[in-house]
Image: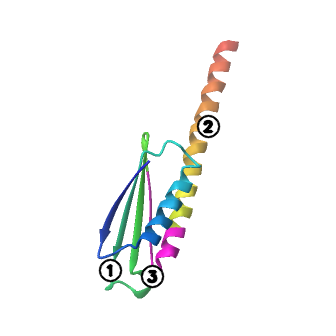
């Protein structure tokens, strides 16, 4: 999986960058079909004090783009919230494919029985 970064008014130290990469790599457990992760991180001091940091992560997959965005004053909280959202979306994506396969198999079995 390729990880691309975009920063606006923000400097990310190596420790936080590694933390984000570890969280993104954890998401590969839910689907090995993730091609690319785009991380958009920005800081806006004029926003409400509790929403100064914005993190958006887009995961590119076959026939799908999963997206999660959060705002908070603490970078680690933002990362945790976005990871939680993406995990839910990946679970839903995985079960969707399985559900379609089951439905298709039922139709095929029905046709075979006549």
Look at 41% across and 68% down and name the residue there: 55
Look at 53% across and 63% down and name the residue there: 83
Query: Which quarter shows the C terminus?
Result: top right
- Say whether residue 114 is left or right of residue 89: right
The stretch drawn in magenta includes residue 24: no
Residues packed near mark 1 inside 10 Å, few (<14), some (14 to 19) or many (20 plus): some
Q: State the separation of the CA atoms marked 3 and 2.
A: 38 Å
Tell me if label 3 and label 1 are in contact, CB under 8 Å: no
Judge by depth and name the residue closer to the eye, 10 or 49: 10
Judge by depth and name the residue closer to the eye, 29 or 66: 29
Tell me if label 1 and label 2 are in contact, CB under 8 Å: no
Look at 34% across and 73% down and name the residue there: 42
Q: Relative to 23, does residue 44 appear above or below in the rendering?
A: below
Q: Which type of secondary structure does the marked residue at label 3 adopt?
A: loop
Q: Quadrant of residue 12?
A: bottom left
Can you tell which mark lies on residue 44?
Answer: 1
Q: Which residues are magenta?
A: 66-80
Q: Which residue is mark 2?
A: 98
Q: Nearer the viewer, mark 3 or mark 2?
A: 3
Q: Earlier in the sequence, mark 3 or mark 2?
A: 3
Q: What is the number of callouts on the image?
A: 3
Look at 33% across and 85% down and name the residue there: 45
Residues packed near mark 2 inside 10 Å, few (<14), some (14 to 19) or many (20 plus): few
Q: State the separation of the CA atoms marked 1 and 2.
A: 42 Å
Judge by depth and name the residue closer to the eye, 52 or 4: 4
Q: Which residue is mark 3?
A: 73
Where in the figure is residue 89, as x and y percent of width and height? Answer: 54, 54
């Amino acid at each position: 999986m390729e990880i691309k970064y975009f920063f606006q008014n923000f400097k990310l130290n190596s420790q936080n960058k590694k933390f984000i990469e570890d969280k993104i790599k954890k998401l590969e457990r839910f689907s090995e079909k993730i091609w690319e992760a785009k991380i958009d991180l920005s800081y806006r001091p004029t926003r409400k004090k509790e929403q100064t940091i914005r993190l958006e992560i887009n995961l590119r997959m076959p026939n799908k783009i999963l997206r999660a965005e959060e705002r908070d004053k603490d970078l680690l909280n933002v990362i945790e919230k976005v990871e939680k959202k993406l995990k839910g979306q990946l679970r839903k994506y995985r079960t969707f494919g399985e559900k379609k396969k089951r439905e298709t198999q039922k139709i095929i079995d029905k046709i075979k029985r006549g």
